[in-house]
Image: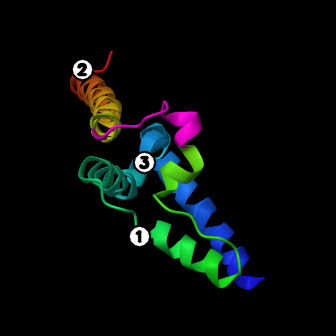
């Protein structure tokens, strides 16, 4: 029972990590210090996708499921849980690489917009502070 709950917790953590890596830049708009966690998550997610590595959470979940008496699965997290909903049938290596690059580019755009917004706000504050009082 405990191993199954741990496997489910790893599954949930893995799914949340993927969501955070893909969409966490939007959270950084609200909480800029979160970038210190988000940027390494994006780098890891893109690297795993581009290189074809298995995320360490996948074998951990499989081992916990087997320990709980359940059947494990072959392939990775995305293959097993998300392939049918995220990727078209017949996932190819170029599509997997493109998804990793896409995650990186999406977040690069979000961060570029965030940096531009902060620069405009700083310039407005500077202009306001340097203008003479009326």
Q: Residue 94: x percent and y percent?
A: 27, 35
SS class of the residue under badge 2?
loop
Coordinates of residue 4 in the picture (x, y in percent): 71, 76
Q: Secondary structure at mark 1?
A: loop
* Position above or below: 100 against 81: above
Give the foreground label among 1 and 3: 1
- State whether residue 24 is above or below residue 44: above
Relative placement, left or right, of 56 versus 71 is left
x and y percentages locating residue 28 in the rendered image: 43, 43
Q: Is residue 109 magenta?
A: no
Q: Which residue is mark 3?
A: 21
Q: Nearer the viewer, mark 1 or mark 2?
A: 1
Q: Residue at x 28, y 52 (%)?
A: 43
Q: Is residue 116 above or below residue 56?
A: above
N-terminal of the pair, mark 2 or mark 3, is 3
| Residue lying farthest to the right in this orientation | 1
Q: x, y (%) of residue 41?
A: 37, 55
Q: Residues within 10 Å of mark 2 (few under 14, many from 20)?
A: few
Q: Which numbered disc, 1 or 2, marks the residue that appears first in the sequence?
A: 1
| Residue that mark 1 sits on | 56
Residue located beneath label 2 in the image: 132
Number of numbered discs on residues: 3
Which of label 2 and label 3 is nearer to you? 3
Label 1 vs label 2: CA separation? 59 Å
C-alpha gap between disc 2 and disc 3: 45 Å
Of residue 127 and residue 15, the one placed in the foreground of this image is 15
Position of the C terminus by quadrant: top left
Image mark for residue 3: none
Q: Which residues are magenta?
A: 83-93
76 or 38, which is in the foreground? Answer: 76
Q: Is residue 120 left or right of residue 30?
A: left
């Amino acid at each position: 029972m405990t191993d199954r709950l741990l496997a489910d917790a790893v599954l949930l953590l893995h799914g949340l990590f993927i969501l955070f890596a893909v969409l966490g830049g939007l959270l950084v708009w609200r909480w800029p210090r979160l970038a210190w966690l988000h940027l390494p998550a994006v780098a890891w997610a893109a690297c795993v996708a581009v290189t074809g590595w298995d995320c360490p959470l996948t074998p951990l979940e499989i081992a916990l499921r087997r320990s709980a008496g359940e059947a494990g699965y072959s392939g990775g997290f995305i293959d097993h849980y998300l392939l049918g909903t995220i990727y078209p049938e017949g996932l190819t290596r170029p599509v997997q690489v493109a998804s990793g690059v896409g995650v990186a580019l999406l977040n690069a755009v979000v961060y570029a917009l965030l940096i531009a917004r902060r620069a405009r706000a700083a310039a407005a504050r500077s202009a306001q502070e340097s203008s003479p009082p009326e």
